[in-house]
Image: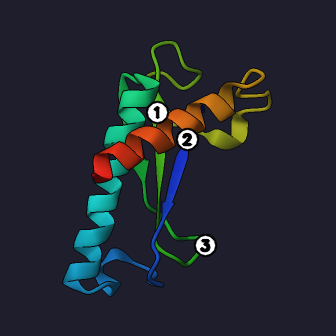
Amino acid sequence: MVGYVCLVSRVHAVDLHDLSAAQSESFMRDAHRVSSALSAVTAAVKLNYEIHGNTLPHLHMHFFPRYAGDPFEGRAIEPYRIRHAVYVAGQFARLRDQFVQVLGAGAA
């Protein structure tokens, strides 16, 4: 999906409750910042969030922007079903640069 982001905890933990209160608050603040920046940059109609840890036992959160008419509209995202290029030439770099700029501006 265009705009997909994965936030990885800097502190090793398998589950959110494995972090201290301060560490989990920091992770969720980062998730909020990513969510806000991603929403602003992609203009998605909705963001889906996933935390699993079944195949990679380290705390991380997936952000999936949702768009009207996307291949999974009205149902769960199944990224493994996407078999075509997600970005047109140059789109990824432009989106990444905008995201980093907005994310950095939010830290100020």
Q: SS at mark 2? A: loop
- Numbered mark located on residue 11 in the image: none
Residue 29, x across and y down, in percent: 26, 60
Name the residue rendered at 34%, 44% in the picture: 105
> On the image, numbered disc 1 is attached to which residue?
65
Image color mode? rainbow
Residue in front for this viewpoint, 88 or 58:
88
Determine whether the residue tagged by mark 3 lies in a helix, strand or loop. loop
- Residue tagged by mark 3? 56
The label nearer to you, 3 versus 2, is: 2
Residue at the spot 49% in from the left edge and 44% down from the top edge: 100
Q: Residues within 10 Å of mark 3 (few under 14, many from 20)?
A: few
- The amino acid at mark 1 is Pro
User: How far apart, in angstroms, are the residues tagged by discs 1 and 2?
Assistant: 6 Å
Q: Position of residue 32 (x, y in %)?
A: 28, 51
Q: Nearer the viewer, residue 60 or 42?
A: 42
Of the two numbered discs 3 and 2 on the same chain, state the one appearing first in sequence: 2
Q: Position of residue 25 (x, y in %)?
A: 22, 71
**How far apart, in angstroms, are the residues tagged by discs 1 and 3?**
22 Å
Quadrant position of the N terminus in the picture: top right
Residue density around tag 1, few if under 14, some if 14–19, many if 20 or more, within 10 Å: many
Q: Do we see residue 75 in this rendering?
A: no
Q: Which residue is label 2 attached to?
A: 4
